[in-house]
Amino acid sequence: MAESRSHDAVLRAFLVLWREEHVLLLRCWDVKREQRIYRLIDVKLDGDDPAPVRLARQAREDLGIVVVSDDLSLAHVTHRRADRQYVDVFFATRVWAGAPALRTPSYCDEVRWAELGRLPEGTALDARAGLEGISHGRLFSMVGWSPTE
């Protein structure tokens, strides 16, 4: 009998906070790669809450800011293939209350505003793919698929 392979995609949501032409990145420890990477606030969607609600809650937990879920707008969707399939949904806003400050210093050690066209070395591939799609004005992109698939 052939080995069974799951085709279920992992659904994740990302928060893009804009300030002028810059986006907010967190530098956090990546256990898998055993190094620090720049990333966006993100959540795995499990069906308990809508993506904007989960992202607003995570922004408060990670940065101590108040994001209203109704202020988030869809910015990009990436269908990505890496170790498995991912559907990454990017929501963006220029509106929040409070000054972003790290609230998880044992995990993240830097908050950085990065110019969209000049992301720092070490930016996570999932965040980079979505931000590049946004910078090119595309709503949807595919990453990690061969051209014939």
Image (cartoon, rainbow, N blue to C red):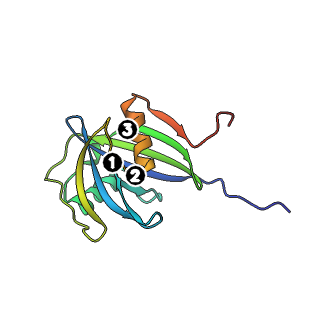
The residue beneath circle 1 is 15
For image coordinates 39% across by 63% down, the residue present is 35
Image check: 34 left or right of 17?
Answer: right
Question: Residue 65's image quarter?
Answer: bottom left
Image check: 122 left or right of 33?
Answer: left
Where residue 78 sits in the image (x, y, percent)?
49, 41
For image coordinates 14% across by 53% down, the residue present is 99
Of badges 1 and 2, nearer the viewer stands 1
For image coordinates 31% across by 68% down, the residue present is 107
Amino acid type of disc 2?
A: Pro
Where residue 3 sits in the image (x, y, percent)?
78, 62
Secondary structure under tag 2 reads loop
The residue beneath circle 3 is 74
Amino acid type of disc 3?
A: Leu
Quarter of the picture containing the C terminus is: top right
Where residue 56 sits in the image (x, y, percent)?
29, 53
